[in-house]
């Protein structure tokens, strides 16, 4: 797990980001719960203009954290990936999926992304 702030530039330009309070508001939980999830490495934030922000793509359509996101973070982190590398993996197009792994986590290819994360981490 990385203690270094991840610059927002690791994500594609224009990727929607939410401040920690905004993310907490979307979840309907106290801000402290989101900070706990960040501290427990269940979420990864980037830093933009000195403010921690979380990719909106981590949310499901029901305004919960996508259930596969913490698992992919854990698999890749356990495999030695830095937070920056994890975000790069999730937000980079993969023609064999097709699309980005983060988008596939919201559909029928979620388990395939998990399988690939596990395989690439070891």
Image (cartoon, helix red, strand yellow):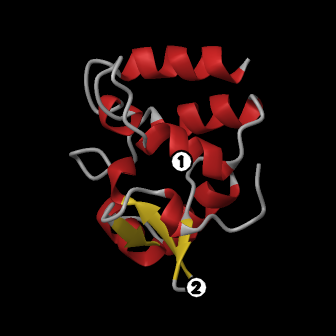
For disc 1, the marked residue is 87
Q: Position of residue 45 (x, y in %)?
A: 55, 62
Q: Position of residue 86 (x, y in %)?
A: 59, 42
Question: Which residue is most to the bottom?
Answer: 49
Q: Nearer the viewer, residue 89 or 53?
A: 89
- Residue 12's spot in the image, x, y percent? 39, 56
The circle on residue 50 is 2
Residue drawn 62% across and 14% down? Answer: 119
Tell me if I can see residue 13 in this picture: yes
- In the rendered structure, the answer to whether residue 122 lies left or right of residue 12 reads right
Circle count: 2
Q: Secondary structure at mark 1?
A: helix
Closer-to-camera residue (120/67): 120
Say which quadrant the C terminus sits in: top right
Give the answer, above or below, for where 62 lies relative to 121.
Answer: below
Q: Is residue 107 left or right of residue 67?
A: left
């Amino acid at each position: 797990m990385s203690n270094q702030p991840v610059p927002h530039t690791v994500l594609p330009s224009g990727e929607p980001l939410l401040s920690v309070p905004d993310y907490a508001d979307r979840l309907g939980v106290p801000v402290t719960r989101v900070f706990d999830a960040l501290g427990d490495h269940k979420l990864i934030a980037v830093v933009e203009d000195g403010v921690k922000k979380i990719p909106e793509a981590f949310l499901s359509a029901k305004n919960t954290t996508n259930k596969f996101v913490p698992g992919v973070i854990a698999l890749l982190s356990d495999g030695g990936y830095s937070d920056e590398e994890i975000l790069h993996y999730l937000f980079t197009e993969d023609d064999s999926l097709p699309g980005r792994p983060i988008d596939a986590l919201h559909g029928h290819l979620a388990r395939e992304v998990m399988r690939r994360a596990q395989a690439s981490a070891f």
